[in-house]
């Protein structure tokens, strides 16, 4: 059996995890006057929206978001009754602070959420100045740093900072929100223990399937689907689960950073094909990549070929039916972007296997 690369993180049921109390979001360079740990990134956005509204009764429900983003980013706004408009993103996924500000002013938005991509600094211009100007205009800014959690990129002077920690390691859940001023009302205190149990069960089952050759793959996959369904259907706000705290606080962050960077560099140096356009290269010590994102014309056939070779390359993100036609940059990314896994579970041999399989695909 080929060893699998990518897809859901597993948890080792035999690993002893020390009980370490949860730290603050300062571990992600997110500083502010108050913070809350939550079960997801989307619930962190929801908490920020709720607090902005409580501080500003009668707020005009118009928000500006990135034109290339995850459905979990715009859904909290749609569910709260917002009209959502989008700032432009170029084909290399950069945006300028001037364009973000211009879009917010043009539509008289009350909330502007912005984010960078895949561990790289894709925001051009003076982002802090933009946040200041938005504040002067009575508008609120939220930086979503999910995709750059471990990159040493200074956080913006935004009114709120939010993030999801689930994409970087095997935490069953986990997100946070930080506010620059005041304190949060409505911080959740209880975790979603049903979700926590479902995620742990799926993650332990994956470990046993991969490393002890026990169990059935389709049963394991359905366990993950069930757990994600619980998460998708959360209505209340929940705090981060105990298991996520334990996994996060026991995480070897230096190894996470080193392996992701090393794996990324191997792909950068080896995937030299006219058919593939890598979106980013590591230029300095700041960048800790989430994936190795590439633009490819034949995305679905390549993704299927990789899958047939036990390499699971996700599409981050599929375009949601609720999103209207966007700028060329966003449309290009929604159509052609494929993410190659490079996370800390893998090493040089795994990266070389990815290169071999991709080269085989284009030789066919
Ligand atoms: C930028 C960004 N924000 C928020 C989220 C949502 O995180 P969660 O799935 O924990 O709600 C994601 C998920 O991919 C994301 O990429």
Image (spheres, rainbow, N blue to C red):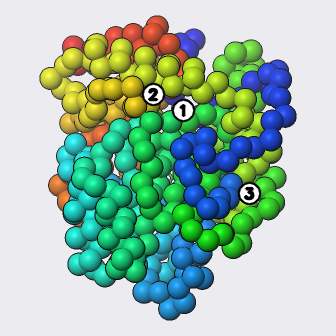
**Residue at point 45% right, 27% down?**
341
Mark 3 to mark 2: distance in Å?
A: 28 Å
Q: Is residue 168 left or right of residue 323?
A: right
**Residue at point 28% right, 32% down?**
280
Q: Is residue 79 left or right of residue 139?
A: right
| 314 or 285, nearer to the observer | 285
Residue at mark 3: 239
Quadrant where the N terminus lies?
Answer: top right
Work out whether mark 3 precedes mark 2 in sequence or the reverse, and give the earlier one. 3
Report which quarter residue 85 is drawn in.
bottom left
Q: Is residue 1 left or right of residue 239?
A: left
- Residue 7, percent across and down? 54, 32
- Residue 273, percent across and down? 19, 19
Work out whether mark 3 precedes mark 1 in sequence or the reverse, and give the earlier one. 1
SS at circle 2: loop
**Residue at point 57% right, 68% down?**
181
Residue at mark 2: 341
């Amino acid at each position: 059996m080929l060893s699998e690369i990518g897809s859901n993180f597993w948890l080792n049921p035999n690993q002893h995890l020390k009980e370490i109390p949860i730290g603050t979001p300062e571990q992600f360079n997110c500083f502010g006057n108050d913070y809350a740990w939550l079960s997801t990134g989307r619930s962190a956005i929801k908490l920020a929206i709720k607090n902005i509204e409580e501080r500003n009764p009668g707020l005009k429900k118009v928000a500006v978001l990135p034109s290339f983003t995850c459905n979990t980013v715009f859904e909290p706004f749609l569910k709260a009754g917002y009209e959502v408009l989008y700032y432009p993103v170029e084909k290399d996924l950069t945006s300028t602070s001037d364009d973000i500000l211009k879009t917010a002013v043009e539509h008289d938005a009350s909330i502007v959420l912005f984010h960078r991509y895949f561990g790289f600094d894709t925001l051009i211009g003076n982002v802090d100045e933009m946040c200041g100007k938005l504040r002067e205009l009575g508008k609120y800014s939220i930086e979503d740093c999910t995709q750059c959690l471990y990159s040493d990129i200074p956080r913006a002077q935004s009114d709120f900072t939010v993030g999801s920690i689930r994409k970087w390691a095997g935490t069953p859940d986990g997100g946070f929100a930080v506010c620059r001023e005041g304190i949060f009302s409505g911080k959740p205190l209880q975790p979603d223990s049903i979700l926590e149990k479902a995620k742990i069960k799926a993650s332990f089952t994956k470990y046993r399937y991969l490393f002890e050759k026990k169990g059935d793959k389709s049963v394991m996959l359905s366990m993950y689907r069930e757990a994600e369904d619980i998460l998708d259907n959360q209505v209340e706000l929940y705090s981060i689960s105990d298991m996520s705290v334990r996994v996060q606080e026991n995480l070897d962050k230096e190894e996470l950073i080193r392996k992701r960077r090393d794996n990324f560099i191997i792909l950068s140096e080896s995937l030299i094909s006219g058919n593939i356009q890598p979106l980013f290269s590591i230029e300095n010590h700041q960048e800790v990549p989430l994936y190795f994102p590439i633009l490819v014309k034949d995305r679905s056939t390549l993704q299927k070929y990789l899958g047939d070779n036990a390499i699971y390359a996700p599409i981050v993100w599929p375009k949601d039916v609720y999103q209207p036609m966007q700028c060329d940059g966003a449309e290009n990314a929604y159509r052609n972007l494929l993410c190659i896994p490079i996370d800390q579970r893998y090493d040089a041999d795994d990266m070389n296997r990815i290169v071999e399989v991709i080269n085989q695909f284009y030789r066919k």
